[in-house]
Image (tube, helix red, strand yellow):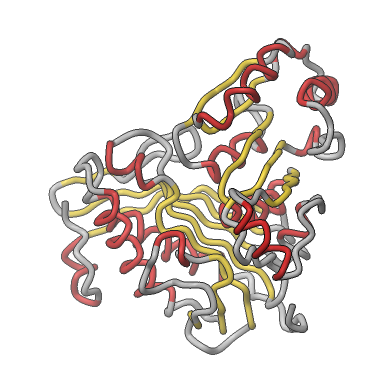
Amino acid sequence: MSERTKERPDRNLAMELVRVTEAAALAAGRWVGRGDKNTADAAAVDAMRLMIDSVSMDGVVVIGEGEKDAAPMLFNGEQVGSGSGPQTDVAVDPIDGTTLTSVGQPNALSVIALAPRGAMFFPGSAMYMHKIATGPEAAEVIDIDAPVAENIRQVAKAKGKRPEEVSVTVLARPRHDALIAEIREAGARVLLITDGDVAGAIVAALPRTEVDLLLGIGGTPEGVIAAAAMKCLGGSIQGKLYPRDDAERQALIEEGYDLDRVLRTDDLVAGDDVFFAATGITDGYLLEGVEYWPDGATTYSTVMRARSGTIRSVKSDHRFEKLERFSAIEYRP
């Protein structure tokens, strides 16, 4: 891990970042419901890559499209930003929920996170990880190594609920059949999501939502991005790397990863100079999606900063005629 810079990201970066996610969401929004997740993702990547170089930072992509999506840009190790300003680690997901976008389902987002250079965990060959995430009230009581029923009991106690009132978000995957049975056996409710576990983790950490906990195996890159949001929200995420087969297990061991190590929020993203921005692509329980009108569109975003604890909601109206004067990206549906 590289030596961490003493120069901290400037506060104005927060609003620069939301322009990046807005651009990606506007580009992806044209493909909502069209059944082509690859084209939607490519459009979002192109728009995000174009806009990210306007951000005043000397950035390196630590969590990018990478080999998981075989993308030609926003790959791990790529230099991004204007080249001036603080040295930063950058985590991007132009579309968290490509399938959701392609079929017009809720909760697709465009997200970006920023931290000082060397602050973000690099997952190497680890594509997936076990995860548990919750909000500030129960941040100190969750334990990824504890039985599911014990975590539910502890979260319920911390939030002043009965276990039967606890709701747990889980990705709808066959690998989670046993987990879902354990959650229900403990008396809690299961809220299945088809994709988008960054949004799933964030909603579990937000106040006044029906979700108390996120459990299950999901993407490691998404776990790092979610950890950045947890830093801003005061929540907690824990993870353990999950090799899918013996070859991946051996590769991780050779890369020096401890597969028994519990990765906590601070292990995934260190420090408090952390920024997170997200813009809705489709309507969801976190953000509204892109709304189109004859000459433009409206986007809905959230911008967070860990050091100040500030969480902003941003509604932006965009006029296509003006956007297209300085951008080669096609934003019209």
Residue in view at x 49 percent, y 69 percent: 16
Task: Indicate whether 333 appears above or below 283.
Answer: below
Question: Can residue 95 be seen in this snapshot?
Answer: yes
In the drawing, does residue 152 fall left or right of residue 75? right
Tell which residue pokes out farthest to the front in this image: 246
Question: Can residue 311 be seen in this snapshot?
Answer: no
Displayed quadrant of residue 183: top right
Displayed quadrant of residue 272: bottom right
Task: Indicate whether 156 appears above or below 13.
Answer: above
Residue in view at x 67 percent, y 56 percent: 249
Where's residue 216, x and y in %?
63, 35
- In this orientation, which residue lies closer to the viewer: 218 or 317? 218
Tell which residue pokes out farthest to the left in this image: 294
Where's residue 204, x and y in %?
64, 34
Residue in view at x 50 percent, y 83 percent: 79
Where's residue 297, x and y in %?
25, 51
Where's residue 143, x and y in %?
83, 37
Displayed quadrant of residue 77: bottom right
Task: Indicate whether 209 appears above or below 51.
Answer: above
Instruction: Give the position of the N terminus as an image quadrant.
Output: bottom right
In the drawing, does residue 93 fall left or right of residue 138? left
Residue in view at x 34 percent, y 33 percent: 105
